[in-house]
Image (cartoon, rainbow, N blue to C red):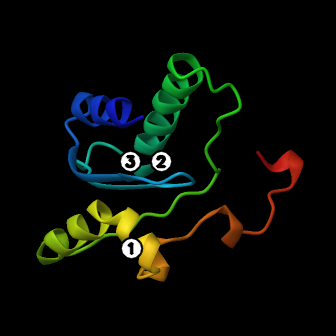
Amino acid sequence: MRESIRLTCEEGAIIQYELGIMPDHVHLFVALPPTISLSSFMHRIKGGSSHFIRVREQNKSFEWQRQFGAYTIHENQIPRLIEYVRNQPDRHASNSLYANLEITERDFPPTPPNAT
């Protein structure tokens, strides 16, 4: 997955500051150029990595949650956010998380079957 995400960022001239992969979620800290919409970027990230996981890792049941979270930050917050994403395993082990950066599918109401 890491390589797939890196290549997607590279192909789109997207600055990837940091990537943290946990067993049940991913933190990806990037800077998108103004020519790429967030939804387009996420479609490319999720599509490319899903293909990689299903084909190369033979995990046919893998799927992303439908939702994702995105934030804008001031450039002076870049080092702090890089550190946060880089240290995901330690932060989860010690439960020292930033709650607003840890939104998962559990935090959303179920999506009705015909709403996709």
Q: Position of residue 12 (x, y in %)?
A: 26, 33
Q: Amino acid at mark 1?
A: Arg
Q: Position of residue 62 (x, y in %)?
A: 65, 35
Query: In terms of secondary structure, where does tag 1 sit?
Result: helix
Q: Earlier in the sequence, mark 1 or mark 2?
A: 2
Mark 1 vs mark 2: give the one in front: 1
Q: Is residue 99 above or below residue 79?
A: below
Q: Is residue 49 left or right of residue 19?
A: right
Q: Which dot marks residue 60?
A: none
**3D distance between C-alphas at marks 3 and 1:** 30 Å
**3D distance between C-alphas at marks 3 and 2:** 5 Å
Query: In terms of secondary structure, where does tag 2 sit?
Result: helix
The quadrant in which residue 116 appears is top right
Mark 3 vs mark 1: give the one in front: 1
Which residue is under mark 1?
91
Q: Position of residue 46 (x, y in %)?
A: 51, 38
Q: Is residue 71 above or below residue 94?
A: above
In front: 3, or 33? 3
Which residue is under mark 2?
39
**3D distance between C-alphas at marks 1 and 2:** 28 Å
Q: Is residue 8 left or right of residue 104?
A: left
In front: 103, or 13? 103
Q: Amino acid at mark 2?
A: Ser
Count of all numbered marks drawn on residues in the image: 3
Q: Earlier in the sequence, mark 3 or mark 1?
A: 3
Residue at image x 49%, y 24%? Answer: 52
Q: Assess disc 3: are there few (<14), some (14-19) or many (≥20) residues with their C-alpha within 10 Å of its C-alpha.
A: few
Q: Position of residue 29 (x, y in %)?
A: 30, 57
Which residue is under mark 3?
37
